[in-house]
Amino acid sequence: MACVPVARNQVLVSAGEPADYVYFVFEGMMRVYKLVSDGRRQISGFLYPEDFLGLAVNGRYGYSADAVIPTVVCRMPWAKFEQFIDDVPRLERHLLEEVGNKLISAQDRLLVLGRRSSSKRLAWFLLMLAQRQGRDRPATVIHLVMGRADIADYLGLTVETVSRSFTSLRISDLIDAPNSHTVRLLDPNRLRDFADS
Amino acid sequence: MACVPVARNQVLVSAGEPADYVYFVFEGMMRVYKLVSDGRRQISGFLYPEDFLGLAVNGRYGYSADAVIPTVVCRMPWAKFEQFIDDVPRLERHLLEEVGNKLISAQDRLLVLGRRSSSKRLAWFLLMLAQRQGRDRPATVIHLVMGRADIADYLGLTVETVSRSFTSLRISDLIDAPNSHTVRLLDPNRLRDFADS
DNA sequence: CGTACTCTTGATTTCACTCAATTCAGGTGG
DNA sequence: CCACCTGAATTGAGTGAAATCAAGAGTACG
């Protein structure tokens, strides 16, 4: 399993290309997305270390992925990976659960994108990051690796609206933002209430 | 594997309930959804005959499901189903593909909900139905089993906006609608172009 | 140290939501 | 068989939230 560096903004896999490899993020952060004809982008997720990348339909990648920051990924040929699965039956069951969970959470996101105001989407996003970053208890200080444009493309908003939403949460004393890449959740419970009210 | 009828609007599984059974739709149509606290609903999919229902997280259903029209479903206890999977290794691989495809298509929907105008969402929805209904070539005449409210809750719109979008597509000569449950695609290619322009 | 990018804020426009009324279709009972 | 009733769909008017257009301030990187 070869590990390679991926530079900031470098595209690792492109939607529609033959899915020759599966990848695991070792360090950094990858951005998974699809492009629309008019140049707009919908980000479907951010990958942290240990996350898996390489889901395919009909032997081709279903989306594109590039690096948010300098990143290291480890890759394995699909053929070898399939062999792996065959050898370790538990792995397949595990993978099934994993994909099932991703499906459930994708459907949760449908709910957010379809029915929530901009500030609530942002609140929900921050809570999700907090959950993911704190290994035991959810963290109250979040380091935003991605920029505003990434958040916008993840939440289906514009950069300007994301920025205004940050301001709005700040004014409501739900968050504190010492700089644009750091957020402190002042009252996670109240933020949670706000997000799904 | 027992088969039971489900009346129109009857709830078959509820989000959060213990996931004791898996179901297969035999006849009719099921509606898979989640409710938000304010009473609104996000439909995550419509199930046709042969479709599978019963995905769970931590042993509990991740969403609710009820019948759009009188429907017949066949059910099997989870335990028995797992046994089935163990006995037939190919089944698990098949299931993994199935869930993977659903994940990809859920992500496509994120794109639609996040970034598209109401008419384009509807166009995309109709094309999806056409694809699903025509077994070989996509159908050009679509029978809408579900009502406007269902379509609205699927596309993250209101009933009124869905209705206006139908009118808009009709005026643009993209569709014809003899009655509210029948749609004819006058020019699928042009509709396709419109949907992802 | 300067240049380019990112982020924020302001003004205006647009598109979908809300509220309200009317039309239409299907089903029921006289 | 027709009149009525109910729920569904359409249409209209007005409002509101986010997009767009446009500057300016901040920050990071070469």
Image (spheres, coloured by chain):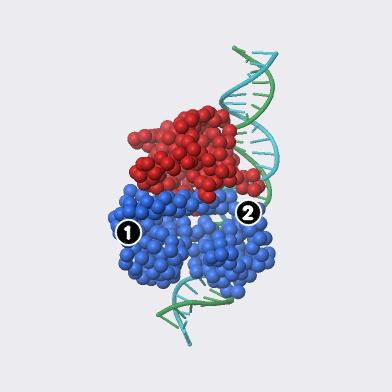
Chain colours: A blue, B red, C cyan, D green
Give the residue at x 41% y 67%.
A26
User: Numbered disc 1: what chain?
Assistant: A
Q: Along the line of sight, which residue is nearer the eye, A6 or C13?
A: A6
Give the residue at x 64% y 63%.
A188
Labelled pair 2, 1 in contact (Cβ < 8 Å)? no
Left or right: A126, with A30 as reference point: right
Write down the quadrant of residue A76 in the picture: bottom left
User: Numbered disc 2: what chain?
Assistant: A
Is label 1 in a helix, a strand or a loop? strand
Q: Position of residue B149 (x, y in %)?
A: 57, 38
Q: Along the line of sight, which residue is nearer the eye, A38 or B148?
A: B148
Residue at numbered disc 2:
A196
Residue at numbered disc 1:
A21
Q: Is residue B107 visible?
A: no
Q: Position of residue A174 (x, y in %)?
A: 66, 65
Residue B139, compared with residue D28, is above or below; it is above
Q: How many marks?
A: 2
Give the residue at x 55% y 50%.
A111
Q: Along the line of sight, which residue is nearer the eye, B7 or A136?
A: A136
Q: Position of residue A60 (x, y in %)?
A: 33, 52
Mark 1 Cα-neighbour bin, 10 Å: few <14, some 14–19, many ≥20: some
Left or right: B188, with D1 as reference point: left
Number of the front mark, 2 or 1: 1
Q: Is residue A48 visible?
A: yes
Which of the two discs, 2 and 1, labels the residue nearer the N terminus? 1
Give the residue at x 59% y 64%.
A137
Left or right: B14, with A40 as reference point: right
Residue D13, compared with residue A163, is above or below; it is above
Residue A89, compared with residue B19, is above or below; it is below
Mark 2 Cα-neighbour bin, 10 Å: few <14, some 14–19, many ≥20: some
